[in-house]
Image (cartoon, rainbow, N blue to C red):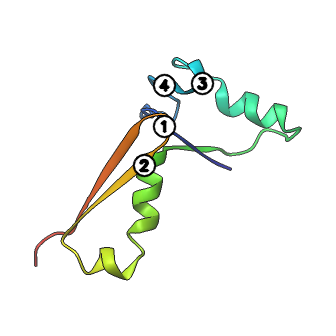
Amino acid sequence: LVLALPCEVAPEGRPGSCSYLGLEAFTELPELALAEAGLPPLLTLLVNDAELAAASASLLPEAQASRRTLVLTLGFGLGSALLERPTP
């Protein structure tokens, strides 16, 4: 299961500061989301939404042909990630 949230993700994979829907550092979110969906505990990967969008965008030929690609996510706020390819 992959959860993409517009918040910081701590090194241990827990939500950091997140004002989305009033959830401030709501560390039990993955477990509660699974329980609410009636699912057993699963391996859950929590990522920042802009980082996930950038990972997806990196597969596009246009991004692969560029040295730099800026990816923006728009929702309740603005998120961003910058893809940079090393110079040969």
Q: Earlier in the sequence, mark 3 or mark 2?
A: 3
Count up the numbered dots: 4
Asked whether 15 or 70 is in front, the reply is 70
Type of amino acid under label 3: Leu
Q: Earlier in the sequence, mark 1 or mark 3?
A: 1
Q: Is residue 17 left or right of residue 31?
A: left
Q: Quadrant of the C terminus?
A: bottom left
Mark-to-mark CA distance, 4 and 2: 15 Å
Mark 1 and mark 3: span between their CA atoms?
10 Å
What is the secondary structure assignment of the residue under circle 2? strand
- Residue 21's disc number: 3
- For label 1, the residue is 6
For label 1, count other residues whose C-alpha is less than 10 Å away and answer few (under 14), some (14-19) or many (20+): many
* For the residues bearing labels 2 and 1, Cβ distance under 8 angstroms: yes
- Residue that badge 2 annotates: 73
What residue does disc 4 label? 18
**Secondary element type, mark 1:** loop
Q: Position of residue 28 (x, y in %)?
A: 65, 23
- Residue 10, percent from left and from top: 43, 31
The percent position of residue 72, horizontal first and vertical second, equals 36, 52
